[in-house]
C-alpha cells in the first residue's frame, strides 16, 4: 500500500522503516503537518498516516476523498484531531493504535509527580552550578497523600496502581469504574469530591466536548490550595489562562504538563533559535513550580516499536479488505463522549 506519512521526524522514519521490513508497504515520508494547506501532498495516496497534531477536519477530509484517499491511519491512541463523523459519512476507514505502551505514559506521569514533589528540576540546575544549599527545595512525601485520577482507562489505571504503590490514598472518576482498581482500594467518587479532597490530580480521560477545559476557574476553586496538577492526556482538558491565575495565587502548588492546548505550533520542533510568540505558554514557563515536557510521555523504545507495528498491521488489513485491528468507529467514539 502507498502511504503518505505526515509530520515525519527522524525517529518516525527509523521505527516505521524497521517495522516495514516485515510488511513491505510503500512509505513516503513527508515532514509537513497535515493541514488544509498541505493536504495536496496526499493526492493519490490511498492511505494517509497521521499523528497527534495533524488536522484531519472536514475540509481536509473532503480534499482527501476527492483525491483518492480511503484510509486514515493514526499512529497514536488519541483521535480528537479527526472529525470522525465526517470521516465516516465520507466513507473513510479510520484506524489508530489504541494501546502501545500505556506503561510509558503512566511512568512519565509518575516522573512528573515525583520531580515536582521533590523539586528535582531546581536541584538539577543548582548542583551543576555548585550550589548545594537546600533552601527552597523542601519536598513532600507522596505517602499519605490523596491522589485523584480522572479517567481510569489503559493509562489512568496504571497510574492509579503506581500511586497506590507509593502509599497514596487513591480516588478516581470515570464513566466506567474499574472493578480491579476498586478491589485494590481505589475509591470512585464524583468530580467535585475528587477535586475537593485530592492533593495530587492527574488527568487521563480523552479530550471530548464533555471534558474540554475540565480544569477551569470553577473546578480550580474547588481544589485544595497547593494542589499538584498533572496533565499527560490532551492539552485542552486544561484552561491555560485559568491555570496561570491559579499558579499566581498559589492555588496550584505545582503543575506538570506533557501536553498544551496550543501545542501544535510548538511541540516536536526545535525552536531554540526563535522567539516563541505564545505568551501564555511562555508565562507558564516562568513559574518555578512548573515542569513542561513537549508531548514525550509516549516516547520510549518499546512504545515506538509497538506504534510502528500496529500502524502497519492496520494498513495491511485495509489493503486486504479486512477491518483493521485498530478500527475507530464514530458511533463507538460517540458512546464515550466524542
Ligand atoms: P482509554 O480510552 O483507555 O481511557 C480513557 C478513560 O477515560 C476511559 O476509561 C473512559 O471511560 C474515561 N472517560 C471518558 N470520558 C470521561 C470523562 N468525561 N471523565 C472521566 N473519564 C472519562 O485511553 P488511554 O489510552 O488511557 O489514554 C488516555 C489519554 O491519554 C488520551 O487522551 C490519550 O490521547 C492520552 N495519551 C497521551 C499520550 C502522551 O504521550 N502524552 C500518549 C498516549 C495517550
Image (spheres, rainbow, N blue to C red):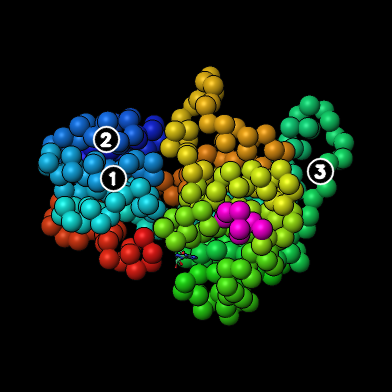
* Residue 248 locus on image (x, y percent): 71, 43
> Please, what secondary structure does the residue beneath circle 3 have?
loop
* Residue 52 in view (yes/no): yes
Counting other residues with Cα less than 10 Å from the Cα at mark 2, is it few (<14), some (14-19), or many (20 or more)? Answer: some
In the rendered structure, are the residues bearing label 3 and label 1 in contact, judged by CB atoms less than 8 Å apart? no
Q: Pick whichever, 318 or 231, lies toward us.
A: 231
> Please, what secondary structure does the residue beneath circle 2 have?
loop
Mark 1 vs mark 2: which is more N-terminal? 2
Residue at 74% across, 54% down: 226
Q: Which mark is residue 57?
A: 1
In the picture, the quarter occupied by the N terminus is: top left
Mark 3 vs mark 1: which is more N-terminal? 1
Q: Is residue 216 magenta?
A: yes
Q: Pick whichever, 47 or 187, lies toward us.
A: 187
Q: Which residue is mark 3?
A: 137
Label 3 CB, ligand 1: below 8 Å?
A: no
Mark 2 vs mark 3: which is more N-terminal? 2
Residue most toward the top?
A: 273
Range of residues picked out in magenta: 215-221
Residue at 57% across, 78% down: 182
In the rendered structure, are the residues bearing label 1 and label 2 in contact, judged by CB atoms less than 8 Å apart? yes
Amino acid at each position: 500500500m502507498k502511504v503518505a506519512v505526515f509530520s515525519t521526524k527522524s525517529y518516525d522514519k527509523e521505527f516505521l522503516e524497521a517495522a516495514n521490513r516485515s510488511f513491505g508497504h510503500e512509505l513516503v515520508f513527508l515532514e509537513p503537518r497535515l493541514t488544509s494547506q498541505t493536504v495536496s501532498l496526499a493526492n493519490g495516496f490511498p492511505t494517509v498516516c497521521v499523528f497527534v497534531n495533524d488536522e484531519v477536519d472536514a475540509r481536509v477530509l473532503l480534499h482527501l476523498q476527492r483525491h483518492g484517499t480511503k484510509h486514515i491511519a493514526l499512529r497514536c491512541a488519541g483521535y480528537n484531531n479527526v472529525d470522525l463523523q465526517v470521516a465516516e459519512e465520507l466513507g473513510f476507514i479510520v484506524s489508530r493504535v489504541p494501546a502501545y505502551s500505556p506503561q510509558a505514559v503512566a511512568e512519565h506521569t509518575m516522573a512528573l509527580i515525583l520531580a515536582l514533589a521533590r523539586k528535582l528540576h531546581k536541584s538539577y540546575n543548582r548542583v551543576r552550578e555548585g550550589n548545594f544549599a537546600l533552601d527552597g527545595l523542601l519536598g513532600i512525601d507522596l505517602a499519605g497523600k490523596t491522589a485523584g485520577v480522572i479517567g481510569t482507562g489503559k493509562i489512568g489505571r496504571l497510574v492509579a496502581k503506581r500511586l497506590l504503590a507509593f502509599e497514596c490514598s487513591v480516588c478516581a472518576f470515570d464513566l466506567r469504574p474499574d472493578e480491579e482498581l476498586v478491589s485494590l482500594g481505589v475509591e470512585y467518587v464524583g468530580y467535585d469530591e475528587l477535586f475537593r479532597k485530592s492533593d495530587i490530580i492527574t488527568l487521563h480521560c480523552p479530550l471530548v466536548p464533555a471534558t474540554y477545559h475540565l480544569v477551569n476557574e470553577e473546578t480550580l476553586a474547588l481544589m485544595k490550595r497547593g494542589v499538584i496538577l498533572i496533565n499527560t492526556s490532551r492539552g485542552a482538558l486544561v484552561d491555560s489562562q485559568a491555570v496561570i491565575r491559579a499558579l499566581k495565587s498559589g492555588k496550584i502548588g505545582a503543575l506538570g504538563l506533557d501536553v498544551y492546548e496550543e501545542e501544535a505550533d510548538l511541540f516536536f520542533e526545535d525552536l531554540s533559535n526563535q522567539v516563541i510568540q505564545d505568551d501564555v505558554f511562555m508565562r507558564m514557563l516562568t513559574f518555578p513550580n512548573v515542569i513542561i515536557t513537549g508531548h514525550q510521555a509516549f516516547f520510549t523504545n518499546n512504545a515506538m516499536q509497538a506504534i510502528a507495528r500496529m500502524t502497519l498491521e492496520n494498513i495491511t488489513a485495509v489493503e486486504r479488505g479486512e477491518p483493521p485491528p485498530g478500527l475507530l468507529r464514530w458511533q463507538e467514539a460517540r458512546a464515550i463522549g466524542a
